[in-house]
Image: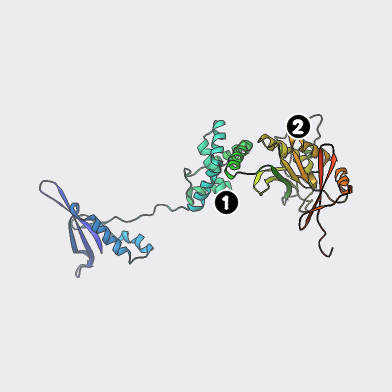
Amino acid sequence: MFLRETRRTNRDGSVVSYLQLAHNERHPVSGNPVAKVIHSFGRADTVDRAALARLVSSISRFLTPEQAVTAPTATTVVGAVGAGEPGGGVEVLDSRRLGAAWTLDRIWERLGIGAAIRRVAVGRRLDGDAVERVVFALVCQRACEPGSKLAATGWVAERVAIERCPGFTDDAAYAAMDFLLDALPEVAAEVFGSVAHLLNLDLDLVFVDTTSTYWETETADELAELADEPADDETSNPAETSNPAEAGTRAFGHSKDHRADLPQVVIAMAVTRDGVPVRCWSFPGNTADTAIIRTVKDDLGGWGLRRLVWVADRGFASAANRAYLTRGGGHYIHAEKLRHTNTEAAATLARPGRYRTVADNLRVKEVAVAPGGTATAMTAPAPSGS
């Protein structure tokens, strides 16, 4: 059963259309389907369209969603009396995934990442919108269906719907990554400013720590081409340069994964007291913690974060680093072992006085060790049975 339209041409050349409800019956002699009119709605221009809509709604109640979608393909529109052609159906031209990409896009813009990339790209005389969309598409692909940059081009063109990004070439992907690598400090600074305001971050206390990760390869990388030649007062060891991040390559070093036989990089991260990341860095695998802390302080100082309390473990606790962290009014909290510790911590532990309990497993004693300064000794009770 279907709704069909028939047309009749008058002598004056005017065309009149009629709507009819019909169904096909097979001719007893020829065997061909023949339309049989069940009900005539009259002239198309006078039909009560609201009544037709109610009829469709009433019929749809007895159909599943899948049947409701495929039902229009059975409709036939007749262009002339006696001649029929299919029409009025739904043809699916394309189908894309939307939900995850749309959600990530909203978060991307809410955090100010897209705006930061566009502003920095325009400042470098690039098409900010195009570059930002490619960078987002690559990030979205890594979050939803991780793959290579070449795979991302096909993923965006065929599988997902990303606003204002119908597709791009692999050359555009590599160009966008080159831009992001070069402009990352500027982009990160803008994003940090936006997120700090949005989340009302508490930046009085910053925790810093490092880890390492290794590659299953037997050889280390050559020094990065962009690494500066060491000055007269510097050594060629990346761990002793003032900016070890410039040579961020895989190198052999002390492995926290106990794989000293494999090249690695060192990763540093600064977070707020609530654990919200502020910034992360990568260094050559042979870079010591003592060199890293200076780069971290200088970089965060460039973001206007100077008067901070730094919290770090004993790897950062050299006298030079402690002096460096206090520049510009900064302060630090770092951990020391009870044995084999530095002079200040030893003096603190040797000073008489009672510890004050601040938690079930933490006792504190504050001792002045230098004019105008204090050192605080903290100790925890030994576990039961030890």
SS type, badge 2 = loop
Say if mark 2 contacts mark 1, CB within 8 Å: no
Tell me which corner region of the image, top left, top right, bottom left or bottom right, holds residue 296.
top right
Number of residues whose C-alpha sits closer than 10 Å to that of mark 1, classed few (under 14), some (14–19) or many (20 or more): few
Q: Is residue 56 left or right of residue 327?
A: left
Q: Is residue 26 left or right of residue 150?
A: left
Q: Which amino acid does label 1 sit on?
A: Ala
Q: How many labels does the image show?
A: 2
Vertically, is 10 above or below 53?
above
Residue nearest the observer in this picture, 278 or 364? 364
Report the quarter where the N terminus lies.
bottom left
Q: Name the residue under label 2.
A: 229
Q: Which residue is drawn at 22% across and 62% down?
A: 21
Vertically, is 244 above or below 160?
above
Q: Name the residue under label 1.
A: 143
Tell me which corner region of the image, top left, top right, bottom left or bottom right, holds residue 319.
top right
